[in-house]
Image: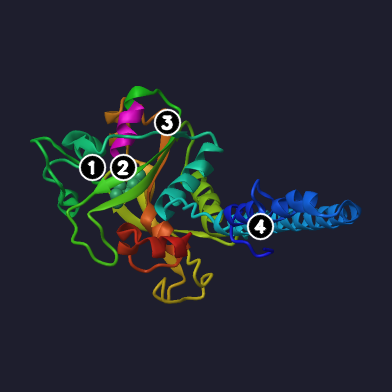
């Protein structure tokens, strides 16, 4: 009885002995057939047997209930079980590099401006001092759409668009996508990201640019970053410089990432060309300015220590988890 499987089998036992025609009930009924002096003793014995049986039935019912509770607990949620770690994901390294760079400039009073990825030839080239027959256009083989419009090859067109809308001084950064008809390899992607910077006001010079970029790279890569300008040419700046920063991989000593030079190239820059200022409605006699364009993938790759740009675009969750 103690290991009764269910309430029904306990009830069967009760009915069999204590029910209206149960065995004990029948014995009790037959007391009347005994000689009167024996009846009290027989009654006591029967009562004791009934009490015993009822106590055993109650015990068995309790044992059954607790076994059922135990079974129920094992098949439902165990609230004491240690929780798993939820998969929360993270910002993509490109987005993070862009947000970090924008944050640096926003804290210094620069406005973040977004431009259209479909741009006119005029803003992408002509307004930036790159006329139709300029050889610089060749290096920017691009995706042309309707005549006169194309996927922008850089974020620089927003320099002119912004200056046309706002009188000096202006201080902006332009994060966003740019497109070139480049074959995909470890270093190139036909779609990539840049952040453009532009500061135009009376008395602005290259020293300001160097200081601002040094601060940017120290924030992005670490406190020991330096900036190196290398003379270069861009039609929309004069003078122009390639921007290098200390290779964060080796701290300047030379390694595989920097090809042994201790520096990594990260963008282009210069003083905004007077033709560009004039084309934007500014007076080069009143204001001067610097501009730069920095590659976001380059920043993300160096920070995440990956040497193939495709890793950033294939978005294999296992790789992204490693990068996070
Ligand atoms: N637009 C250039 C490019 O995509 C980068 C650049 C160079 C931007 C010099 C600038 C600059 O603003 O002053 O290669």
Task: Kindly identify which residue carries mark 2.
Answer: 155
Q: Quick one: 211 or 185, which is closer to the camera? A: 185
Q: Nearer the viewer, mark 1 or mark 3?
A: 1
Task: Kindly identify which residue carries mark 4.
Answer: 64
The span shown in magenta is 154-163
For marks 2 and 4, give the CA distance.
76 Å
Element under disc 3: loop
For marks 3 and 4, give the CA distance.
92 Å
**Place of residue 228 in the rendered image (x, y in percent of width and height, measured from the top left):** 46, 60
Q: Are marks 2 and 1 in contact (CB under 8 Å)?
A: yes
Q: Quick one: 26 or 122, which is closer to the camera? A: 26
Q: Is residue 132 above or below residue 73?
A: above
For marks 3 and 2, give the CA distance.
22 Å
Task: Kindly identify which residue carries mark 3.
Answer: 287
Q: Nearer the viewer, mark 2 or mark 4?
A: 4
Q: Are marks 2 and 4 in contact (CB under 8 Å)?
A: no
Mark 2 neighbour class, 10 Å CA radius: few under 14, some 14 to 19, many 20 or more:
many
**Place of residue 24 in the rendered image (x, y in percent of width and height, measured from the top left):** 72, 55
**Residue pictured at 79% horizontal, 49% vertical:** 32
**Residue pictured at 27% horizontal, 46% vertical:** 178
Among numbered discs 2 and 4, the one appearing first in the sequence: 4
């Amino acid at each position: 009885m103690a290991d009764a499987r269910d309430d029904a089998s306990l009830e069967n036992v009760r009915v069999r002995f204590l029910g209206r025609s149960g065995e004990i009930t029948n014995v009790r009924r037959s007391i009347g057939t005994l000689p009167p002096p024996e009846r009290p003793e027989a009654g006591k014995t029967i009562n004791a047997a009934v009490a015993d049986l009822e106590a055993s039935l109650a015990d068995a019912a309790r044992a059954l209930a607790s076994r059922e509770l135990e079974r129920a607990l094992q098949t439902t949620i165990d609230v004491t079980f240690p929780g798993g770690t939820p998969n929360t994901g993270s910002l993509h390294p490109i987005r993070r590099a862009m947000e970090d760079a924008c944050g640096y400039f926003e804290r210094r009073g620069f406005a973040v401006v977004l431009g259209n990825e479909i741009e006119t030839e005029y803003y992408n080239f002509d307004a930036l001092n790159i006329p139709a027959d300029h050889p610089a256009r060749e290096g920017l083989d691009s995706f042309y759409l309707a005549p006169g419009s194309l996927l922008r090859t850089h974020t620089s067109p927003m320099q002119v668009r912004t200056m046309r809308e706002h009188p000096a001084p202006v201080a902006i950064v332009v994060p966003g996508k740019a497109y070139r008809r480049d074959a995909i390899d470890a270093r190139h992607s036909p779609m990539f990201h840049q952040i453009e910077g532009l500061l135009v006001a009376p008395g602005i010079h290259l020293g300001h640019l160097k200081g601002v970029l040094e601060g940017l790279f120290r924030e992005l890569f670490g406190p020991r970053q330096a900036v190196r300008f290398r003379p270069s040419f861009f039609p929309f700046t004069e003078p122009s410089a390639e921007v290098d920063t200390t290779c964060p991989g080796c701290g300047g000593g030379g390694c595989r990432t920097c090809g042994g030079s201790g520096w990594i190239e990260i963008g282009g820059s210069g003083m905004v060309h007077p033709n560009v200022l004039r084309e934007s409605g500014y007076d080069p006699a009143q204001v001067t300015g610097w501009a730069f364009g920095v590659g976001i993938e380059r920043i993300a790759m160096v920070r995440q220590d990956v040497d193939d740009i495709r890793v950033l675009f294939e978005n294999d969750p296992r790789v992204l988890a490693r990068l996070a």
